[in-house]
Amino acid sequence: MSDGLVQILDGNTFVVSDSNGDIEASPTDATGLFTYDTRFLSKWVLTINGERLNALSVDDLQYFETRFFLVPGTGTVYIDAKLSVIRRRAVGNGFHEELTILNHENEPVELTVRLDAASDFADLFEVKDALAKKGRYSAQVDKRKLVLSYDRSTYGRSTAISASEKAQIDETGLTFKITVPGHGTWSTTLDVSIARLMVGQAPGAPEAPQHAQRRMRRDLDRWLDGAPKLQCDWDALRATYHRSLVDLAALRFSPPIAGGRSLPAAGLPWFMAMFGRDSILTSLQALPFAPELAATTLRALGDWQGVGIDDFRDEDPGRILHEMRYGELTAFEERPHSPYYGSADATPLYVVLLDEYELWTGDRAIVRELEMEARAALDWIDQYADLQHNGYISYQRRNEDTGLENQCWKDSWDSISFHDGRLPGFPRATCELQGYAYDAKLRGARLARLAWKDEELATRLEREAADLKRRFNRDFWVEDGQYFALALDPHGAQVDSLTSNNGHLLWSGIVDKSKAKAVARHLLGPRLFSGWGVRTLAEGEGRYNPIGYHVGTVWPFDNSFIAWGLRRYGFKEEAAAVAAGILEAAEFFDGRLPEAFGGYERGETRYPVQYPTACSPQAWSTGAPLLLLRTMLGLEPEGEHLIVDPALPDTIGHLELLDIPGRWGRIDAFGRGRVDVGRQRTRRR
Amino acid sequence: MSPGRTSAFFERLAQREYDPMLRNAVGTARFEITDKDSTERWLVTIDKGAISVSRRNARAETIVRGDRKTFDKAAAGRLNVMAAVLRGEIVISGDPRFLVQLQRLIPRPSGGP
């Protein structure tokens, strides 16, 4: 998000405005009121006597509520305010705004207060790609409200705008002719509501705005109360932790199929939607803090699991969805997101999450409930994902037009490249997919014994996992460089660049013990480790660019899983160094880690440079500090117990995480900082 | 009335009796298939995978309504139900999770829309 923009959100409804509270969207920016991937308001501009206002301050009261303090006149240094204006805005079904004008003079003033309103009903995809509309716009005015509409055959969306005070309403807005007494105030409420979304959706009485705000406040309090308490002598970490919990609460999203329960959406503004990969990884990160997210994610993704072959949507039986969208382009099948299944990692990761969730919570019932889904996911790995019949997951889109080329987390067009910069053909078998498949098979075997009573399946999965590990360590290992290749190309050749994916391999457990040390050395080495974190692509690779989306930037989420992987293989100090770098970077972003930041050497810039169009907040960046806390404290469920084995950077004196929920009830974990991360950083030279 | 694709779909469904894909689903849906001047109704009840189908016009917590052309396309695997709902061609009310579970029974195209 660009600077100066103010955003508030609730579920998948959000408002992005400038610091005056005004919205003046261009076809390509994501300001406005959005819900279900559609912009319901693209213009909302307040003037008094024809003049725009000037922002004095903005208070983010809650993630769903903001207050703007304004005075008339713009662009002047000297402000002699005879009036002040307060706009207090909260998201609900649309948004609710309380507009208050204070007269500071002795004499009454007559004012013309105007709100210009319009909606382009753009699909978020159109906003991203600047596409033209095919339907018809209309505006209806009656005494009490203005209704803006868009219709394209059976598809219709409407926004209704109304005020509590008497207004003259026309097709482009509302005008109030008012007199404010000396030292008096005038106020009105304004409601912008989603009047028509999906046809047939029971309209029902919309929740009163005061109720909605009380509900959201109560809900946030309950959420924060339910999370473990963090105490430590590093103030910034406490702030980051709090920020993460609040942002995760804001990014919870209740898809209409989840029965009011919520799972993490991906991120604001582009990805307030159900995403397989993002929801699964964020649920994993948050398991020690908010395990209920995982249960909803598993059920919602299970309900949408693929059942047949659909080339347009890249759907196969057993496949877990990549992305679900609700906008016009999806409705008219100009985009495949209803839902789209083009992800090669979400399906094995689904089994990983189910197992990890059971390990933490002991909730065996859900393992039985989702047995069919988990079995179908495991079958998908061998029956549908092995495109080359060589025992590896690989991907190649069947929807050549609007499908995704790269179906791994590094999904931009140039993310998968050889050392010399060439791009491999398709299908591509990226390395971390094999790690996830290995982990899914072993975890599936555990679940088969524990809850499905299927010894035959368990034995087969273990045999397949062992075979996969043996082949993988032979076929992907780059002998010269002593690391794992990024991928195999369609001819079985190694795509030989050095990448952060090596960290995910440690996390999955597929790495031979004898190779782990070399891998860890690379991850903390000068080509990958920037001092803040591990770069997506190593310095010295053909396509390396410190501000290239997946080819040199540092992704906090990526690093949190790398730290987990390092811990898994016993590299406690290295894990602590990664955690320290990312958590120190968080300080520069007021505790809110962006999706990605520049891969510049730490000593060069002294602060982490945010990637230009990164989403923020973004769910798996929000989850990163949580997973890093887990890895620093060495939290691992073991039977009915929680093992605590801290290895904290020495920049932290002491750290306590109290009331960690799980199958043990609630447990506290303590640690003291002993790992000399400065030494870790200098040793890598 | 000729037994069209849609009716054939429901009749096949009735013979299925049990589908493990729906073993977590519980609910009743009424499908209302509209023609110019008539409405054909099918009542589908799922109880943990057990399927019963009837023509009774009974109460249902979930309603799915659309015209015959739309339903025939769905029955033939030529319609993505979610997209049709977003377009307003199929109108739904009631329990959304149950509807998602039911859409797993709709045949998939093997090529695209």
Image: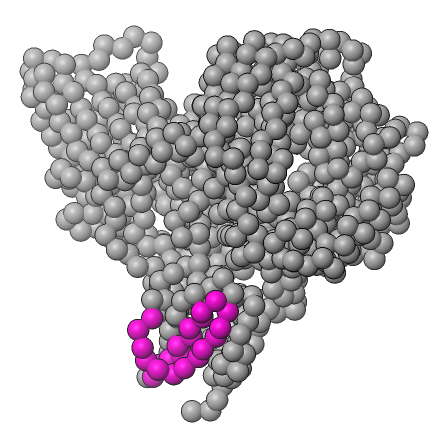
Task: Name the foreground residue: A229 vs B108.
Answer: A229
Q: Which residues are magenta?
A: B38-60
Q: Would you place residue A623 above or below residue A253 in this image?
A: above
Which quadrant, please, contains the C terminus of chain A? top right
Q: What residue is shown at x 74% (from left), y 25% (from top)?
A: A570
Q: Would you place residue A225 above or below residue B49 in this image?
A: above
* Residue B32 falls in image quadrant: bottom left
Q: Is residue A188 visible?
A: yes
Q: What residue is shown at x 39% (from left), y 77% (from top)?
A: B43
| Main secondary structure along the magenta-highlighted residues | strand
Magenta span contains residue B11:
no
* Residue B67 falls in image quadrant: bottom left
Residue lying at the far right in this picture: please name it.
A480
Q: Is residue A597 visible?
A: no
Magenta span contains residue B42:
yes
Image spot of residue A219 (x, y percent): 34, 36
Q: Would you place residue A197 above or below residue A84 in this image?
A: below
